Amino acid sequence: MQSEPSPLHEIREKLALAVGENAVFDGWTLAAVDAAAGQVGINTAQARLAMPKDRAGKIDLYIQAVDRELEAWFTPARLQGLKIREKIRAIVWKRLEIMAPAREAVRRALSILAMPQNVPAGLRSGWRTADLMWRIAGDTSTDFNHYTKRATLGGVYASTLLVWLDDQSEGWTETAAFLDRRIEDVMKFEKFKAQWKGQEHFSVSRFLGRLRYPAR
């Protein structure tokens, strides 16, 4: 039987997005927590008690909050009739839109997560987000594809995020073009995998021989 969320857990969930938005001005600090508490109407002392003391912990809670917003937005009706590439593009794009009010704080967050002591936490959160995006898109794979899809999408999302952080174009057109190219590359890779798996009598030696002596 699943236990009820604790009051502190509920406070963290209410605060998380607001902390990210206030971190634009105050960094990932207690000042951002205090400002967020005032914004959402939570007692400052309770807010401080509920939120992690370290910056990486605050960032992880913010990422989880973005993931929840993303999952809540994509009802089955919003994805109905879309091809898989259209679903993935829509999901990645919506995630950027959710983070838009905290864009400068996200930039700082990436620098913090890149610190050696925070790298494992950053990798876990990245994998968790990629997994969620695929699940929203309807993926139910459990074989090796489960892992390759998430690793590939994680790379697409991470590189798109970096472009987005520096994109000053109207409507983020540069980011949109970059994302479209990356998704097209992924679709080509998935098509290649499907064709490769479909070869009934694949010969490693013949394949390597072709690499060495390509047909003219």
Image: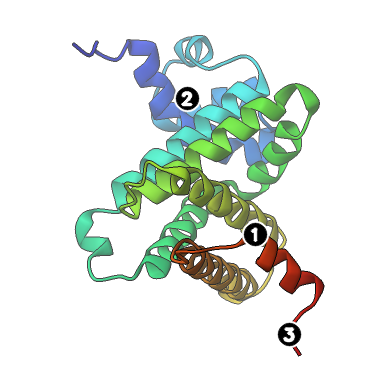
Q: Which mark is residue 37?
A: 2
Asked whether the viewer can see residue 136, the reply is yes
Q: Is residue 187 left or right of residue 107?
A: left
Check contact, mark 3 vs mark 1: CB within 8 A. Answer: no
Residue 33 location, quadrant:
top right
Residue 53 location, quadrant:
top right
Residue 4 sits above or below residue 111 on the image:
above
Amino acid type shown at disc 2? Ala
Distance from Cα at disc 3 to Cα at disc 1: 16 Å
Looking at this view, is 216 or 108 the one in front? Answer: 216
Q: Which mark is residue 204?
A: 1
Residue 142: image location, x then y, percent:
37, 41
Earlier sequence position, callout 2 versus callout 3: 2
Q: Residues within 10 Å of mark 1 (few under 14, many from 20)?
A: few
Earlier sequence position, callout 3 versus callout 1: 1
Residue 50 sits above or below residue 91 on the image:
above
